[in-house]
Image (cartoon, rainbow, N blue to C red):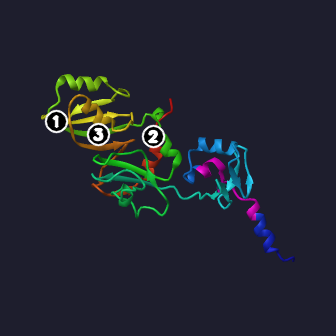
Amino acid sequence: MKKRNNKLVKQAKADSAPPSDLIRLNRYIANAGVCSRREADKLIEEGQIKVNGKIVTELGTKVKRTDKVQYQGKILNPEKLVYVLLNKPKDFITTTDDPQERKTVMQLVANAAEERIYPVGRLDRNTTGLLLLTNDGELAERLTHPSYEIQKLYQVDIDKPITDEDFIKIENGVMLEDGAAPVDEIGLVGPERTSLGISLHIGRNRIVRRIFEHLGYEVIRLDRVMYAGLTKKDLSRGKWRYLNKAELIKIKHMGRKK
């Protein structure tokens, strides 16, 4: 009986890697947090991606996770994708770094992952509530792109009771300096008329505060209670948790580009 050549056997196994060990190059790049898959295709076509030292320009190319993929001279890491949901408190800014050394949301999730995660969208310093952090560049783009119309629900506390006239104005969509601000739904929370729930899918800077300020109201408190179908259930202020499997499936299939 002939002895097996273990070296040749190992090489044969490596060369015939099953499909599960292969990944599309654009997905590899997106998983590394560089950009979305669509943008990765552009980088590939432009010859900006190297695989094992050679420029690759063919779309649909598949690579092994052990291959050396480079962009701008840096080796990319198709790291494990992480999805962290944070209930942001006041006085924390939504940025990965701050030259003024103010408190950032990254301090609150410092122990959440070894991978480099970053916030999806923004909440201003005085706004509390749900904030998603991830290293999934493709999902982040989907959730922030206006064409996907991702819905957000806020509870707003204002300095004085809202009038029926202003309530209707908001319901119909007020016109701000940068265009119309349509809302999906608005409702009163309690009889005092100073606390409201407002649901919208537009994501312009400080949009909820600006809607009320435009009509002469000061926003005392602003809390994002729902984001892309995710809620604050069992998540106290300042705490975080990972998305569960059901939430992840739902959020990845959410929205349809118009």
Q: Against 51, is 60 above or below?
A: above
Q: In which quarter of the image is residue 9?
A: bottom right
- Percent x, y for residue 31? 56, 52
Q: Answer yes or no: do the residues labelled 1 and 2 have beta carbons within 8 Å?
A: no
Please report the residue visible at 69 percent of the width from the left and 57 percent of the height from the top. 18
* In the image, farthest residue toward the right: 2
Residue annotated with mark 1: 194
Provide the residue span drawn in magenta: 13-29
The Cα atoms of the two marked residues, 3 and 1, are separated by 14 Å
Please report the residue visible at 32 percent of the width from the left and 53 percent of the height from the top. 92
Q: Answer yes or no: do the residues labelled 3 and 1 have beta carbons within 8 Å?
A: no
Question: Would you say residue 24 sits in the magenta stretch?
Answer: yes
Q: Quadrant of residue 97?
A: bottom left
* In the image, farthest residue toward the front: 100
- Percent x, y for residue 5? 82, 74
Amino acid type, callout 2:
Thr
Q: Is residue 253 left or right of residue 239?
A: right
Q: Nearer the viewer, residue 60 or 121?
A: 121
Q: In this view, does 97 lie to the left or right of 225?
A: right
The mark that comes first in sequence, 1 or 2, is 2
Residue annotated with mark 2: 144
- Percent x, y for residue 89? 28, 53
Residue annotated with mark 3: 154
Please report the residue visible at 73 percent of the width from the left and 49 percent of the height from the top. 56
Q: Quadrant of residue 10?
A: bottom right
Amino acid type, callout 1:
Thr
Badge 3 crowding class, 10 Å Cα cut-off, few under 14, some 14 to 19, many 20 or more, is many
Question: Would you say residue 196 sits in the magenta stretch?
Answer: no
Give the total of numbered labels. Answer: 3
- Percent x, y for residue 166? 21, 25
